[in-house]
Amino acid sequence: MRRATSFISGPLGAIVLVVALMSVAMLVAGTSPIDGFSALIVGSLGGRSQIGETLVATSALLFPSLGVALAFRAGLFNIGAEGQLLVGAMLAGAFGGFVSAPPVVAVVVMLVLGAIGGGFWGAIAGWMKARLRANEIISTLMLNFVAQYLTLFVVTQWLLGPSATGAETPWLPNNYWLPTLIPHTRLSIGILVALAIAAALQFLFTRTVLGYEMRVAGEAPEAARRNGINLSRITWLSLALSGAIAGVGGATIVTGELHRFNTQLSPGYGYIAIAVALVGDLDPIKVCIASFFFGILEAGGLAMQASAQVPKDAIHVIEGLIILVLAARRYVAQRSERVEEAAASS
């Protein structure tokens, strides 16, 4: 029994369980698992363009996932990364579509505006939590809907591009685009910005006083209060920083992929980011790895649907199963540690 538990809690056991459950989901959907996995691998890693699209999805997920991880480490449930991403992206698209500036300055300003927009949207929920004791789960979730309709209204009323076919801003000039990282793909240097933010967060959590205060506030708020840590300050600052990271992600989508702001630019990156952050155990480095594997599923899922006839709903089921397995692995590992500690103490 102990050997089986150890196997399940290990990385190899988690992989075996994921593959097994994905196979079951494909069989239920009436698809051969061999065809499904082949389509997944080829569609995500089968060539330069496929790898590029996988990394594009990885980059889009990584920004909000890192933001969510930061808030969660501080004991705050930020469900609002989707709205923070949208607001940051809109400000970037508005500047790029209507303001003339030197190219380097324009790109930097758009990224900064993305951070300001997302940070402001996160700070609203932080202020409500710190001053009004509002539940941040509800406030951040509701602010997603406010952001969705606010950006739609602002774009259609004041920022609509002259040749727009939907609610979108004008196209950015070519010299406002982020440089491409892999030729003939959509992958920009935005992913390097995301990795730099991950490294900065790792440094923040392990080497700074602010990071220590965030961790203590999240793990033992009462002890933090007794030791003089201002929990109100940590609350609004954590949610503001969390939103700023998501907002930069929205700006990189505008400048690096779509080259304009469209109100439909996110298929739910902010919501998927919650799962990615949890799967990554709220650790910046592990979140990078989790984002890559979810990027494989996002990019390869289209190929599974087109080539192997795996229904779209089955792909979402597979994503849920992966989250379930990895969460169960974490629970089993923690339970095993407690049993071993109890045995050692006795």
Image (spheres, helix red, strand yellow):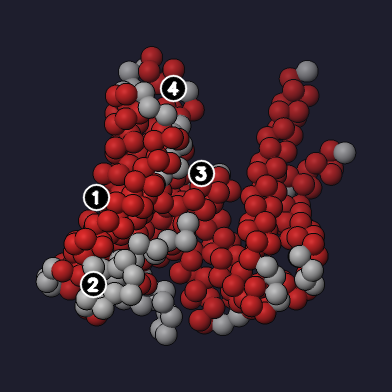
| Badge 4 amino acid | Pro
In the image, which disc is placed on residue 161?
2
| Badge 1 amino acid | Ile
Any part of residue 305 in sight: yes
Give the residue number, with chain letter if any, for mark 1. Answer: 116
In the image, which disc is placed on residue 282?
3
Q: Determine which quarter of the picture holds residue 346.
A: top right
In the structure shown, which secondary structural element does the residue marked by tag 4 occupy? helix
**CA distance for labels 4 and 1:** 28 Å
Q: Quadrant of the N terminus?
A: top right
Looking at the image, the residue that sits furthest to the bottom is: 184
- Say whether disc 2 or disc 1 marks the residue closer to the N-terminus: 1
Image-based side of 295 in relation to 132, left or right? right
Looking at the image, the residue that sits furthest to the top is: 226
| Residue 28 coordinates in the image, percent (x, y) | 79, 62
**CA distance for labels 3 and 4:** 18 Å
Camera-nearest label, 3 or 1: 1
- Say whether disc 3 or disc 1 marks the residue closer to the N-terminus: 1
**CA distance for labels 3 and 1:** 23 Å
| Badge 2 amino acid | Gly
Against 292, residue 213 (above or below) is: above
Give the residue number, with chain letter if any, for mark 4. Answer: 221
